[in-house]
Amino acid sequence: MPSESENSVQTAKKIATCLQSPDKKVRKQVFVDLQTFLSENEFSNQELRNIFSETHMYTLNGFRDKTELVREQAIKFMSFFVIDKLPLNDFYLTYVCPVLVERIGSVELIEESEEIRLELVKFLQAIILKYSNSEQLKPFLGDCVVILCEMVKDKHPAIKELSCRCVVDLAQALPRDFHMQAESLVKPIVSCFGHQRFRVRVEAVKAVGEVIMHSSYKGLDEAIVPMAEKLFDQIPLVRRTVGQVAARWLMEYRDRYSFFYKILPLLLTGLNDEVEETRIEAQDLWEKVGLQYKNENEKDLKDQIDFLLEPPKYYPKDIKRPNLGCRVLVQRNVIKLAKALALELTCWQEDVRVRCSQLLCSLALHSEEGLTQNLQELLPAMYSAARDDDQRVVVNIIRASELMGIFIPTKTWYQLVLPAVENGAHFGHLSVLSGFIKGTPQEYITDKLEEITKLLSDDTLCFTRKKKNQIELIKCVEAILEKFSEKSGSEVGFHLFKIVISVISLRDIENTHFTIDLLQPLYKTLGFPYCDALWSAYAHRLLIHIATDPKSWLVVTSQRCIFETILLESNSAFGENLPTIANILIQTLNPEADPESRLKTFWALSTAFDHKSVIFEKSDDQTAFFAKLISEVFVPSLVWHPGLTAEALRTMAAACLLCALNPSGDVDLFAGGDEFRELWEKLAPLLISLMEDAAYRSRQLAMECVAVLKKHACQHGVWRNEDLIRVYPEILKRLDDPTEKVRLCALRVLPEVFADPPEAFKEPNFRAHHELIIDTLLTHFDDDDKCVRDLVFDVLKVVAVFNCEEVRSKVERHKPLLCNQEGCDEVLDYLKQLLLQ
């Protein structure tokens, strides 16, 4: 009789033979029955082996079944049988692994069902874990690698993810043997780096990390670039995983000393990650790497460990200094890192530039003075990156410049940066320069400020209209002011003053915040008591500097714009530099100069003359200034020339003359009557001629100027009878002007002209003049406009003062002929009251 063991084997075989049934339900049920049979009975290892030997030809064939449900059940059964029941023995794997390779290990896809492929990979993972660290798995390493090479490339995300985990499990299961097949897995796993599911990318990074630990340098070279690209991943967990893998390589990879320069960026970049958790973890890992490196090189670093315990003198207080191991590790690889950074900072990909700029900050912080020899190679890339459209890059470049300024000797960077700025600077050069200046300790840079400011104040640099250049120039000024001291040199103040005034004068339309207020920190830092003192100290020198052929200035000429700012903003310094200003005005307002430039200068001068009490506060001889201005500027400018441009310039010149002549309480424009008479004789004919000008505004201004000049003449006691007779008829003519504004202006000016006439004009032999005046006024006294009638009444009041009887006689005679009876009555009443006084 057969033994019980033989009966069990036969029973199992009998059940298994039913797998040949054409009914798929029967085939599926066979696997269920076999699992039940094996679960409900206890078998020895030999019995289980016999059962496997008798049934495997049937059960493993179930992996090839046409029905998906049967294949699924077959996998579940074999997983139960091989993993849960059978003992460790490579005998079983000899039959199982070839079937797995057949189904999911070939280039041509045999197993079409994604779910079944996933179950097969799970089965493989279970086998790897069960046979981990055993000799039985070693012969099947090749099969496992073949399968995983294909499965990590599977389209199904879950299969990719699980396959990557299997790679890690396999490497850990056969640590001594995995290196023989490791490199063949790198390329397939790297293909998962671009998958849309972040968990697949995370597992792929982990898998590459494990594979490289068992690979030669070729595998590392193949993986390093794709790993670096994952630093730009949008998911923080992916970037964090890259850091974890890089830290492990830095501490455990057997050839790590030869490849530090390639691995370091993967971890250092994480120190500046956008996510705080990632930064903290990267910092912790980096500290561990540094400590291990220090311990491994304790003999070489003994002196530094024992004696260099304190940070450098001016180390930033807001930054924790990396440990010695971290610093030395970077310093020993800085040459290769700097070369790579210099190339990648100008990469066309935005994310690459951002990460490289972050890495540059870390490199500057760790290498400290060790970056000195590589600065020349880095600077061109930094200049370019400082112009980046992405502000994150710009901020990092400036921060790196500040750190370099702290650690790199001033003489070194000074000799490299300044020549680059001098040879045609764009705003990138200026950004980097401001960073270096800001970072360098005051003690080391104060004696270099004079040469730096001299360069920045050169006309080729500070006479710029480019928006960003102006912004960076002001940043340089601010950085220099922070480092300024009494030892900085006597020329620094003027150079900074020139830069600031140039930027204000030439500011871009978008730089509206660059106002005269920029001088506030300048005068305070330079030690002046108030802003006007700053102007007093440097305005004359700046005027001399810009006074190069003012006659040729155009409206956009930089010197003209600066001169305009001086006229408008210099306050009392204006009066201290009258001869220089006058000489420039004579040339720039020459009738042959550019018309648009003349218009702008006239406007600026008019605005300045509106504040005479301020601009002439400290002047010694404004009479000579005005005499020169009237003779050589206003007289030529009021001469008639044909054309609309000439007409506009006459109007502007007349307006400026009026502003100049308007009296100011505490400013005496003319020292005496003789000086005034000389100027009056020059102006009077031109102003009388201007009353006939085609531009109505010129006619108005001419009359207003005559009225103001009459006031000055009375003040100096030189208003003569012939002067009055010379001008009043021309003003009376303007009462018939076609422009209402001119007529009204004439009526407003006449009371001022007729007030306080010379005594000779009151005499009877000038009665004909009186009659002409009164008859002309009464003609307009009947105007339809009440405003005109009221103004004529005001003029008649003034005329009545020196010939009341003639006015009364004329009004009474004309009254019957006038419509304005009420006005005539008012005039007569006023005359009666005047006679009674």
Image (cartoon, rainbow, N blue to C red):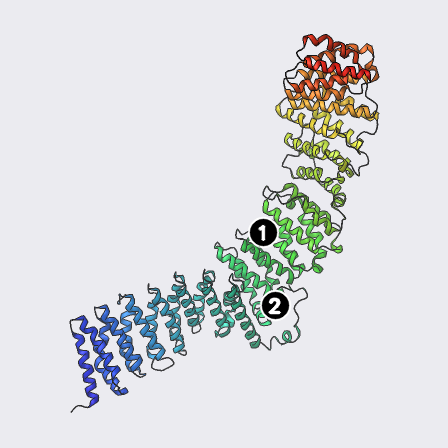
Q: In this view, does 377 lie to the left or right of 697?
A: left
Q: Which is more toward the observer, 133 or 661? A: 661
Label 2 packing within 10 angstroms: few (<14), some (14-19), many (20+) = some
Q: Which residue lies under the disc numbered 2?
A: 321
Q: Which is more toward the observer, 369 or 386? A: 386
In the image, which is nearer the foreground, mark 2 or mark 1?
2
Eyeballing the image, is 8 above or below 283? below
Q: Which is more toward the observer, 632 or 455? A: 632
Q: Which is more toward the observer, 67 or 174? A: 67
Amino acid beneath label 1: Gly
Label 2 sits on a secondary structure element that is: loop
Q: x and y percent of residue 147 in the render? A: 32, 71
Eyeballing the image, is 614 above or below 74? above
Say which mark, if any, is on residue 406: none
Instruction: Report the residue at 44% width, 73% height from top.
Output: 213
- Residue 6 in sight here: yes
Q: x and y percent of residue 301 in the render? A: 61, 75
Amino acid beneath label 2: Arg
How many numbered badges does the structure rendering display?
2
Image quarter of the N terminus = bottom left
Eyeballing the image, is 8 above or below 208? below
Label 1 sits on a secondary structure element that is: helix
Q: x and y percent of residue 562 in the render? A: 68, 40
Instruction: Report the residue at 45% width, 70% height from top.
Output: 217
- Residue 143 in sight here: no
Q: Is residue 90 left or right of residue 736?
A: left
Q: Which residue lies under the disc numbered 1?
A: 428
